[in-house]
Image (cartoon, helix red, strand yellow):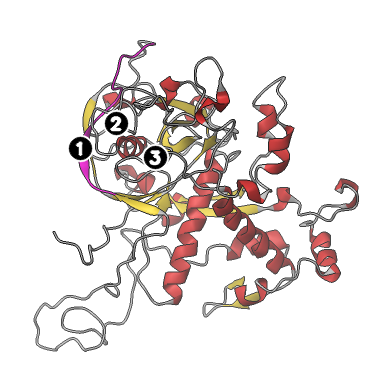
Amino acid sequence: MSYKLTFMKNLLFAILIIPGTVVITGCGALSKKGGKGGSLPNDGQLHGIAPGSKYILPKPPGMVYIPQGMFHMGPSDEDPAYAFSARNRTVSISGFWMDATEITNNEYRQFVYWVRDSIAATQMGYLKTGPNGEESVDWSKAKTIKWSDPKVIEQLSNGGLILAPEDRIFGRKEINTAKLIFHSETFDLKEAAKRQNQGKPRSQFIIKKDIPIYPDTLCWIRDFAYSYNEPMTKRYFSHPAFGNYPVVGVSWKQATAFCEWRTHYLNSYLESKKRTQESDFRLPTEAQWEYAARGGRSQSKFPWGSYYLRNKKGCLMANFKPGRGNYPEDGGFYTVRADSYWPNDFGLYCMSGNVAEWTSSIYYEGRNNFQHDMNPDVRWNAKDDDPPLMKRKIIRGGSWKDVGYYLETGTSTYEYQDSAKSYIGFRCVIDLPASPLKGRRK
């Protein structure tokens, strides 16, 4: 079996519990309240059985809680193009957690290295057999791979993970980034929920894809004709100086793959500790993103609550393209650190400027005319052979190369889901309850 097929089989090491799925477990060791540690009394009465422990995940590192609320979604100013593609409407949003900053190069690199090590471990036979007879990566051995060992390099070269001799520069044996492929398997809940699909086999709603996950570093050159940006291509993702800068060159597909991996990474740990698995990490919907960007200020034009791009001292409040092209005036020429400038009232950094951000929503001009006013969400799982019109995903927030209009909280635009740009990044959300307020007065 090739390393790729083995890797595809072994990537999903977490158990996904889908609504509507019955998980059969023993119930002999349950207390009267449905917890562990006792036995269910044999008195013929209803006592209830909990699906697992009452463990609640603490505050996710690097994330802030966005409380439930209502806001007026849409432009907070005139529509200069008179496009009427985003009309004002009252929307209610339930609470969720959101990354305080855009996903950084260092954070995305953890994903890249995990995929790299998975493939390398599979090629070297570092596998273990589970109780159901399924093979998976033995991470205790995978973490010990010596990348400087000539024997390891030779073995990985034979599998294609190391560049072939004709592709090397000065003989350097580097990773073949084209081989870094994440095998994605997701369950299409929206499709399964349709009335006409009730009773159909579950396999019809499982979507399997292989997604190359290494960022497209050449986008720095491709995005700007007749512009010298080669240093950013060579250094932005690989140099430690840019470790805390937002990752770019990542398509919508790659961003969703990162969210899927992040979910499996967390749930596999919780499973190893016999704890209840949690919700999925995902991209925010357009409505969630706008609600979070406003920071509780329903009619604010920008995340900092002002109608202007400068504060009272004349300082610019975000990283964008001031005036007619004075890029360094705001303190950054290209991108800046993901935690730059002041956060909004929810504690979120760079919701305007720096890099535009992917959302899960499809861009459709008439979407505001039919979507719900409770957690509005318009999605489409576009296939590779779908027309380009169906592959448009909404991006929000504007970027370092955009003028001020795109920084407004109500401005929406789009990019195609399979394209990667030097000015688009992303951040994740997860649906978890708020952390308990320990030591605080109500």
Q: Please rate how many residues cluster around mark 2, counting C-alpha atoms within 10 Å: few if below 14, some from 14 to 19, many from 20.
A: some
What residue is drawn where x is 37% and y is 11%?
A: 80
Foreground disc of the pair 2, 1 = 2
Residue type (three-letter) at the residue carrying disc 3: Trp
* First to last magenta residue range: 66-80
Mark 3 or mark 2, which is nearer the start of the sequence? 2
Q: Which residue is mark 2?
A: 305
Q: Is residue 65 magenta?
A: no
| Label 2: element kind | loop
Quick check: 431 left or right of 40? Answer: right
Instruction: Give x and y (percent) for residue 6.
Output: 66, 64
Give the camera-side residue of 4 and 405: 405
Q: Which residue is mark 1?
A: 70
What residue is drawn where x is 37% and y is 39%?
A: 285
Residue 51 seen from this side: yes
Q: Which residue is mark 3?
A: 342
| Label 3: element kind | loop
Instruction: Give x and y (percent) for residue 326.
Output: 56, 20
Foreground disc of the pair 1, 3 = 3
Compared with 3, 48 (above or below) is below
Residue type (three-letter) at the residue carrying disc 2: Gly
